[in-house]
Image (spheres, rainbow, N blue to C red):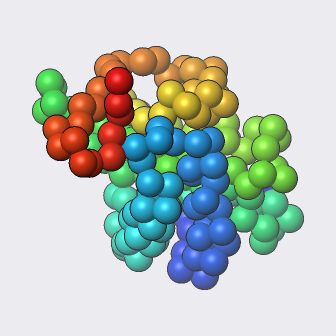
Amino acid sequence: MTIRRATLADLDAIVSLVPRLVAFGPPPWRDPEAMRATDQKVIRAALESRSEDPIVLVALLDGENVAGLIHLHSETDYYTESKHGHVADLVVAGPYEGRGIGRRLLAHAEEWARARGYEWLTISVFRENARALRTYERAGFKEDRVRLLKTLNPEAPGPRR
């Protein structure tokens, strides 16, 4: 397996992976199609970036088959006001799950963050995405805070009780 920076030549393969980002079944108040469209737009912008922040890395098998991707950028912590690395997206193609590709991509994310002098690497995950949550916990990620959502407009999609 090879991991390298993604280019626009990888766009079709990357776009084919984006639906897997919501395949776990997001909360019912989230529109999976809107989520896919946003993911495609943001990942494409990162691909077009010439900087190292944001960046998209791809895992290649047999030198050419895109088996997974990781999209990284920096964020600023609310409390410390310091920058840290953030995994915006991580996805592995279905046929390649269970081969350690996600772990290898996360290891590259750590290298990317360390090279920038960051003390932290963060990642967000929906609770419904249990497999990803377990993978991140096994990789050493710990829960930091929980974000809750309350619908203010009764007509808007959101959690109902």
- Front-most of residues 7 and 133: 133
Going 82% across and 41% down the picture, which residue do you hit? 99
Q: Where does the image place residue 33, in percent across and percent down from the top left? A: 49, 62
Vertical comparison of 4 with 101: above or below? below
The C terminus, quarter of image: top left
Q: Where does the image place residue 75, in percent across and percent down from the top left? A: 27, 43
Q: Where does the image place residue 26, in percent across and percent down from the top left? A: 51, 42
Q: Is residue 109 left or right of residue 134?
A: left
Going 79% across and 44% down the picture, which residue do you hit? 97
- Front-most of residues 44 and 150: 150
The part of the image, by quadrant, that contains residue 101 is top right
Residue 91 makes an appearance in the image: no
Residue 159 makes an appearance in the image: yes
The N terminus, quarter of image: bottom right
Vertical comparison of 93 with 29: above or below? below
Q: Where does the image place residue 28, in percent across and percent down from the top left? A: 47, 41
- Front-most of residues 84 and 40: 40
Q: Is residue 136 left or right of residue 38?
A: right
Q: Is residue 122 left or right of residue 156?
A: right
Going 23% across and 37% down the picture, which residue do you hit? 151
The part of the image, by quadrant, that contains residue 132 is top right
Count of residue discs: 0
Going 18% across and 43% down the picture, which residue do you hit? 153
Q: Is residue 161 left or right of residue 58?
A: left
